[in-house]
């Protein structure tokens, strides 16, 4: 089985890395860290909008490198695990990389935000669940609130 695990180094993505190993033992795991690519437009004096430029992504590059290093610390030198860092929109990149790598399942972590927070901040996990062509296994970093039956 081919498992793609997206990581950003956060606590919830560490849970996703652990969950991939626990729930899919013996699988080939691809660990994916994404460097978000953001285009920024700048308005100058007397201009409606200047030419867009790409922001300096050094911080995001370092964060992705740290996420990969954390995954390597967790998995060790397992020959069934490979590591990749790619640049792009996180949700769309996870979905496209899973398709390109013929992944059988995607494992992602989520902070378990409430509805309003997801509207304001967005959710990579929600995007992946809604757009992936394979099953998505979502690991929450906190338990879901209990609801009466």
Image: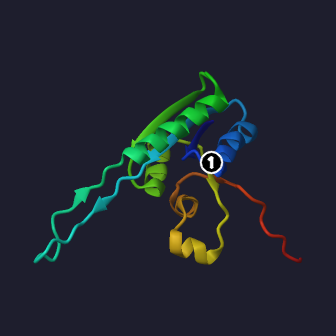
Give the residue pinned by disc 1: 13
* Observer able to see residue 138: yes
Residue at the image position 54 percent from the left and 58 percent from the top? 128
Q: Position of residue 62 (x, y in %)?
A: 44, 41
Q: Position of residue 68 (x, y in %)?
A: 53, 36
> Dividing the picture into quarters, in which one does residue 24 lie?
top right
> Dividing the picture into quarters, in which one does residue 81 lie?
top right
Residue at the image position 65 percent from the left and 41 percent from the top? 17
Q: Position of residue 72 (x, y in %)?
A: 59, 30
Residue 8 in the figure: left or right of residue 49: right
**Along the viewing direction, whichever of 82 and 7 lies nearer the viewer:** 7
Residue at the image position 15 percent from the left and 67 percent from the top? 50
Quarter that holds the C terminus = bottom right
Classify 149 as above or below 58: below
* Observer able to see residue 31: no
Colouring style: rainbow
Quarter that holds the N terminus = top right
Please count the marks in the image: 1
- The secondary structure type at the circle numbered 1 is helix
> Dividing the picture into quarters, in which one does residue 21 lie?
top right
Classify 55 as above or below 51: above
**Along the viewing direction, whichever of 139 and 135 lies nearer the viewer:** 139
Residue 74 in the figure: left or right of residue 143: left
Residue furthest toward the left?
A: 46
Q: Position of residue 94 (x, y in %)?
A: 49, 50
**Along the viewing direction, whichever of 27 and 54 lies nearer the viewer:** 54
How many C-alpha atoms fall within 10 Å of the one at disc 1: few (<14), some, or many (≥20)?
many
Classify 91 as above or below 33: below
Classify 29 as above or below 59: above
Residue at the image position 54 percent from the left and 47 percent from the top? 8
Residue furthest toward the front?
A: 45
């Amino acid at each position: 089985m081919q498992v793609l695990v997206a990581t950003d180094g956060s606590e919830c993505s560490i849970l996703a890395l652990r969950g991939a190993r626990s729930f899919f033992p013996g699988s080939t795991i691809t660990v994916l860290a994404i460097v978000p690519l953001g285009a920024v437009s700048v308005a100058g004096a007397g201009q409606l909008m200047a030419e867009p430029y790409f922001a300096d992504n050094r911080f995001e590059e370092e964060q992705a490198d740290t996420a990969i290093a954390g995954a390597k610390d967790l998995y060790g030198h397992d020959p069934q695990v490979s590591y990749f860092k790619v640049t792009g929109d996180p949700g769309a990149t996870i979905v496209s990389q899973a398709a390109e790598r013929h992944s059988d399942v995607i494992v992602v972590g989520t902070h378990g935000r409430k509805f309003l927070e997801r509207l304001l901040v967005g959710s990579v996990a929600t995007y992946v669940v809604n757009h992936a062509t394979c099953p998505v296994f979502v690991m929450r970093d906190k338990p879901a609130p209990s609801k009466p039956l």
